[in-house]
Amino acid sequence: MSQAITIARPYARAAFALARDEGQFAAWSDALAFAARVAADPQAAALLGHPGLSHDEAVALVAPDAAGGKVASFLALLAENGRLSALPEIAGLFDELRADAERVVLAKVTSAAALPESEVEQIRAALKRRFGREVQLETAVDERLIGGAVIAAGDVVIDGSLKGKLARLQSALAH
């Protein structure tokens, strides 16, 4: 995974620079997300790796219909360099760069059960106070947490799950 990120980083930075120059963060983000979903699909990945597929055909496969000229050119560059498989990492890094530029924190709340919208808004407000930025919140459910929630925002992880508390207790008792 770290090698994929290392490969993807300069491409993500280049895409970000192009999007910034055009003032088109949202359009680039949408186009890269679409291309990343296609490239991550096992059937599409098999096609993209086929030696008989031309660069133009590969770009046509991953590019969204509304892709602008620079997005298509960027995807063509990836195809020429054999880097279309790095699209999921490129899209993720691009979104991180975009969030930083727009002063938005991307956070994920994973809870043992679905959270009511009021609790999600309380978490968003608390994170906004902590980071001093707008918060874009994604929620997920993982019943293995038993209870509570895990919040991941950038490099910060807050584990308030019952599973995490039990693991910390077990570790403390083992020492």
Image (cartoon, rainbow, N blue to C red):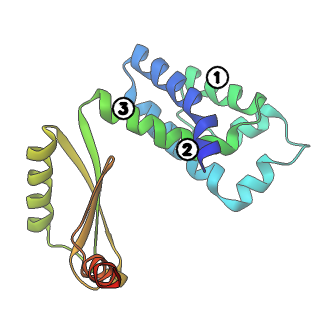
Please tell me whether residue 46 is drawn above or below residue 154 in the rendered image.
Answer: below
What SS does tag 3 mark? Answer: helix
Residue beneath disc 3 = 98
- Percent position (x, y) of residue 75? 65, 31
What residue lies at 35% left-to-right and 77% top-to-bottom?
142
Of the numbered discs in the image, which one, if any, rests on residue 73? 1
Q: CA distance from mark 3 to mark 1?
A: 20 Å
Instruction: Give the farthest residue toward the front.
Output: 175
Quadrant of residue 165 in the image?
A: bottom left
Residue that label 2 marks: 89
Q: Looking at this view, name the residue that lies furthest to the right.
A: 52
**Callout 1: helix, strand or loop?**
helix
Task: Specify the quadrant of the image occupied by residue 149.
Answer: bottom left
How crowded is the residue under tag 2: few (<14 C-alpha within 10 Å), some, or many (20+)?
Answer: many
Q: Of residues 10 and 38, which is closer to you in this image?
A: 10
**Local secondary structure at mark 2:** helix
Image position, residue 173 (x, y; %)? 29, 85
Identify which amino acid the numbered label 1 is placed on. Answer: Ser
Amino acid at the residue labelled 3: Arg
Mark in the foreground, 1 or 2: 2
Q: Quadrant of the C terminus?
A: bottom left
Amino acid type, label 2 = Glu
Residue under the point 42% across and 13% down:
21
For the residues marked 1 and 2, what is the alpha-carbon distance in whole angstroms?
Answer: 18 Å
**Residue 96's x, y, as percent?**
39, 38
Does 101 sit above or below residue 121? above
The answer to whether residue 113 is visible is no
Q: Residue at x 12, y 38 (%)?
A: 132
Label 3: few (<14), some (14–19) or many (≥20) C-alpha neighbours in 10 Å: some
Left or right placement of residue 102 versus residue 119 in this view: right
- The quadrant holding residue 68 is top right
